[in-house]
Every structure is written in structure tokens, then in C-alpha cells.
Amino acid sequence: MSDFRTPLSRARGLGSAKHGVSTWLFERVSSITLVPIVLWAVFSGLKLASADYQAARVWMQSPVNAVLTLLLIIVGIWHMHVGLRVVIEDYISKPLSRAALLLLNMFVCGLGGALAVFSILKVALSVGGLDGGAL
Amino acid sequence: MSQGKPGAAKARPLSPHLQVWRWHITMWGSILNRATGVALYVGALILAGWAVTLASGQDAYIAYTGMLGTPLGLLVMLGLTFSLYYHLAAGVRHLFWDAGKGFDPKLADLTGVAAIGFALVATLATWAIAFMTGAL
């Protein structure tokens, strides 16, 4: 039946996916964004490494610390989702394995990111060094 | 050529791969960038776990940070520190390439060595600071 198709109709939809530019741009923009955030994160990690539980909670209740940690998680996990997607597409060629791994990548990033964001907000919006809900 | 069943894949020539290349510095740089990126994937999940235990209560937090403080945990953190610094330096190198700069082979080799050197020195410096501030 395909004999009835015109050459134009056969050619349509082939070629590039036509939205690769946004992915390429996102990789660059997230890289640039992460440079200062990551340097701040190392500095903060050094401070938190010698802090106890109460001190860590109080640290997270500072607006600047909470927002920068949220940005680190959101931009970082988005960046690594795009990055690992490319790694999977490069090395896994079986369609079913590839689809399964791409889904797994999305689920892990989505779940990890959501858990971290909720947890940061929960601590940041609470009061004091002790968890009020831990009875 | 195998004359197997119809439809069986013929042995096509493959593009040159790892085993036929002499190892050179830009190749190391590229492979390390990808490997450290995958390592940082695990690192981000460790960070997410830290945030979850911080919100879950003191017992969970102490158990989690205690786990990170074991010899194995510290080894993982050391590897993640190096991965972070190397991926950072390699990322900046890539940004210059995106701007069309730094492709000259000698300069590319030099920045490759510089990225690895920076990561090693910065990792040592960070852990020296951690040691001095009593984090270890």
C-alpha cells in the first residue's frame, strides 16, 4: 500500500528529532549554573562535616543555605538526568533494555529529587534544631 | 562471512574503538569526564539521602552520617571529592571548546593535564581543610 505514498510523505518525519538544540543548550546552561553552586556546596560540606544534627538543621533554616541547597539538587539532578541519558543512548542499543534504563533513569532522578526537595523544605520551614515531629 | 539463517547480521566492519588507539591524554580526559559524571550520579543520591535523614530525625541522621564516617564511607567521599573537582574542571574545558577555543592539540593536552592536576590538588586541599577543622 505504501506504493501510493508520495516521496514527500515518505521523507516527512525522518532526519533529526528537531528539538535537540534545547537539550544541548540546557547542558551548557546547567553546567555554567552549577560551577558557583558546586563550589559553595564544597565550602558548606566542609562546615557541615564537623556539625552535629542540631547545627545541621539550624544551618538548613537559613534562607540562603536552603535555597542554594534546593538549586544544587534541582539543577544538579536535572543535569545528571540529561547526562546519564546520553550515556545510556551511547552504550545500550537493544530497544527494550534502552527504554527500561531510560525510564529507570527518569524514575531515580524524579524520586531522588522529589525526596530531597521535600526534606529540605520540611527542615527549612520548621523552627529550631530539633525535629518537632520526632516523638 | 557466515552463511547462516536468512536475516542474520553480517559481520560489518566496526569503527576504530578503544583497543586500537594509543592511549593519550585527551582520551583519558574524555573517559574520566564520563566516569566521574556517573560517580556524581551516585553522589547526588547520597546527598538526597542526607537531606531525607536530616528531615527524619536525629537517630536517622546520626546513623547515616556515621555510615559516611566509616573507612568505606570516607573512601567513597574521597572519590566523590575528586569526581566533583575533575568533572567541574572538565566541564569548564568543554565550555571553552563550545566557544571554539582550545582545540589546538598541544593546548588540548595541556588543559587535559591541568584538569587532572587541579582535581588532585583541590581534593588534597579540601581533605586537608577537613582534617584541620576536625571534620575527620
Image (tube, coloured by chain):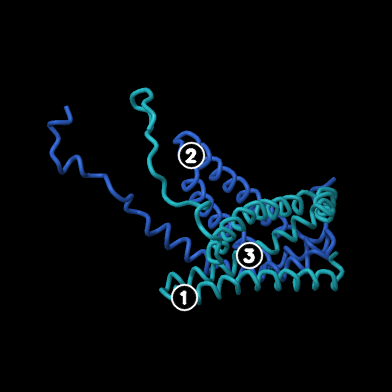
Q: Residue at x 52, y 53 (%)?
A: B18
Residue A130 quadrant: bottom right
Q: Position of residue A61 (x, y in %)?
A: 73, 64
Q: Identify the element where label 1 is drawn.
A: loop
Read off the residue under disc 3. Answer: A67
Which residue is the extreme one toward the front? B1
The residue lying toward the viewer, choosing from B67 and B108, is B108
The residue lying toward the viewer, choosing from A37 and A2, is A2
Q: Position of residue B94 (x, y in %)?
A: 49, 68
Circle nearer the viewer, 1 or 3:
1
**Quadrant in which the N terminus of chain B is drawn:** top left
Q: Of the numbered discs in the image, which one, if any, rests on residue B102?
A: 1
The residue lying toward the viewer, choosing from A44 and B81, is B81
Q: Of the numbered discs in the image, which one, if any, rests on residue A98?
A: 2
Circle nearer the viewer, 1 or 2:
1
Q: Which chain is cyan?
A: B
**On the same chain: label 3 and label 2?**
yes
Looking at numbered disc 1 in the image, what kind of residue is underneath it?
Answer: Gly
Looking at numbered disc 2 in the image, what kind of residue is underneath it?
Answer: Arg
Q: Which chain is blue?
A: A
Dot 2: within a 10 Å radius of its alpha carbon, few (fewer than 14), some, or many (20 or more) residues?
A: some
